[in-house]
Structure formats: structure tokens, C-alpha cells
């Protein structure tokens, strides 16, 4: 993928707070994760849900971001099933809340 296209995709990834949810949009990929991390951390206190309904795609870096945020907040619900998420959850043996499956 050309560098310009990766940068454009990173610029379109976002996170916002809506009640008790962190709401993500765009492609949660390596190019976007570094920029999303500080914003997501600032919005994290009190969050109990991750809303992925507007996420276009998740790669392993995006999954790592979501799993770490979920672990820090004790997230109980992850809604949405963007492309890439199910396969990565299975590969890394994560449950529906992105915690390590037991």
C-alpha cells in the first residue's frame, strides 16, 4: 500500500466517548494506532463498552489497542464485528470482550 494511502487511512481513524462507550471509527490499523492511543487513554476512565460499529477494518495493531484498552477499563461489552476482528480474536485466543479466553 502506498505511503500516502496509509497516512490517509490513519487520519480517518477516530475515537470518541458516548456515555459509557468508547466509539471507534475508520480503519484500526498500525498506521492509526499511535495517534489513537493518547486520545483513547484520555477518554477511557469510566468506559465499560467498546463500540466498533463504524470500524472499517482491524489489523493486529488495532486488536492490541482494543485489547489493552479493554483490559485497563474492565470492558464488559464489545459491540460490532468489523472485518479482521473475528480471525484475529481466534488466532490470539481472545473472548468476546477481547480478554484472554480461558
Image (cartoon, grey):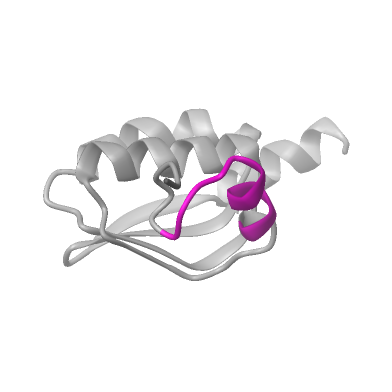
Nearer to the camera, 101 or 64? 101
Write down the quadrant of residue 10 in the picture: top right
Q: Which residues are magenta?
A: 86-96
Q: Is residue 2 magenta?
A: no
Q: Position of residue 15 (x, y in %)?
A: 39, 52
Nearer to the camera, 74 or 41? 74
Q: Position of residue 25 (x, y in %)?
A: 50, 60
Nearer to the camera, 10 or 78? 78
Residue occupying the point 64% across, 33% down = 31
- Farthest residue, direction right: 1
Residue occupying the point 59% across, 40% down = 92
- Can you say whether 3 is above or below 22 in the image? above
Seen in the image, is 81 located left or right of residue 22?
A: right
- Can you say whether 71 is above or below 21 in the image? above
Q: Is residue 93 magenta?
A: yes
- Farthest residue, direction front: 102
Q: How many marks?
A: 0
Residue occupying the point 79% across, 36% down = 4
Q: Position of residue 67 (x, y in %)?
A: 42, 41
Quadrant showing the N terminus: top right
Seen in the image, is 79 located left or right of residue 8?
A: left
Residue occupying the point 33% across, 40% down = 69
- Can you say whether 80 is above or below 88 in the image? below
Q: Position of residue 79 (x, y in %)?
A: 41, 69
Seen in the image, is 18 located left or right of residue 60?
A: left
Nearer to the camera, 85 or 5? 85
Amino acid at each position: 500500500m502506498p505511503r500516502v494511502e496509509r497516512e490517509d487511512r490513519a487520519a480517518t481513524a477516530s475515537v470518541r466517548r458516548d456515555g459509557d462507550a468508547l466509539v471507534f471509527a475508520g480503519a484500526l490499523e498500525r498506521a492509526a494506532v499511535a495517534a489513537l492511543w493518547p486520545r483513547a487513554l484520555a477518554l477511557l476512565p469510566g468506559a465499560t463498552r467498546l463500540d466498533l460499529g463504524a470500524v472499517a477494518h482491524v489489523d493486529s495493531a488495532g486488536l492490541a489497542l482494543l485489547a489493552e484498552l479493554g483490559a485497563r477499563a474492565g470492558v464488559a461489552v464489545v459491540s460490532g464485528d468489523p472485518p479482521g476482528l473475528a480471525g484475529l480474536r481466534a488466532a490470539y485466543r481472545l473472548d468476546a470482550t477481547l480478554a484472554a479466553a480461558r
